[in-house]
Image (spheres, rainbow, N blue to C red):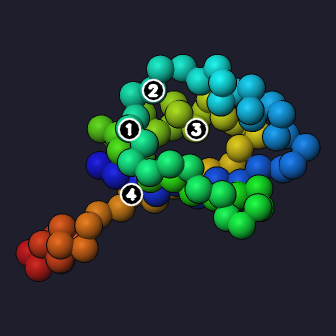
Amino acid sequence: MKYVAFWEYCKKDEKVLIEKFKKRPEQEITRVTPAFHLGGQTKGFSVYEADDFATIEKFIHHYSPELNFTVYPILETTEEIKIRSK
């Protein structure tokens, strides 16, 4: 399943997050897109793919508490139409 993850951090935590990024464990998730920052702000988004949400939670835990995530499962519109048509 694919997920869109919106993330945000405080500028004061930037160095800690950079170190966590360098030391990130082997990931069980696939990054579908690169991480995008929103216009020089301390927030952005990425799209990931994982077998289940528990895998996403492990990924989020590595960057906590400095990086705050809001994550939503996403479907291609054609898949959503199939589900809603049943």
Residue shown at 70%/58% (left/top)? 43
Task: Give the quadrant of residue 66.
Answer: top right
Task: Kindly identify which numbered label has been placed on residue 73.
Answer: 4
- Viewed as shown, does residue 71 lie left or right of 41? left
Counting residues from the N terminus, which is met first, the one under dot 4 or under dot 2? 2
Query: Circle 3 sits on which residue?
Result: 60
- Check whether the beta carbons of the residues at disc 3 and disc 2 lie within 8 A of each other: no
Tell me if 79 is positioned left or right of 25 in this view.
left
| Circle nearer the viewer, 4 or 1 | 1
Q: Which element is circle 3 on?
A: helix
- Image coordinates of residue 45 in percent, x first then y, are 57, 57
What residue does disc 1 label? 30
Residue 26, image x, y percentages? 47, 20
Q: Is residue 58 above or below residue 45?
A: above
Local packing at callout 2 (Cα closer than 10 Å; few below 14, some 14-19, many 20+) is few
Residue at mark 4 to residue at mark 2: CA–CA distance = 18 Å
Marks 3/4: CA distance? Answer: 15 Å
For mark 1, give the secondary structure.
strand
Q: CA distance from mark 1 to mark 3?
A: 14 Å
Total marks shown come to 4
Secondary element under disc 4, as helix, strand or loop, is strand
Q: Alpha-carbon neighbours of circle 1 within 10 Å: few (<14), some, or many (≥20)? A: few
- Circle nearer the N terminus (4, 1): 1
Q: Amino acid at mark 1?
A: Thr
Whole-angstrom CA distance, mark 4 to mark 1, is 14 Å
Distance between the Cα atoms at labels 2 and 1? 8 Å
Q: Find residue 78 and report its horizontal and vertical position in percent.
A: 18, 72
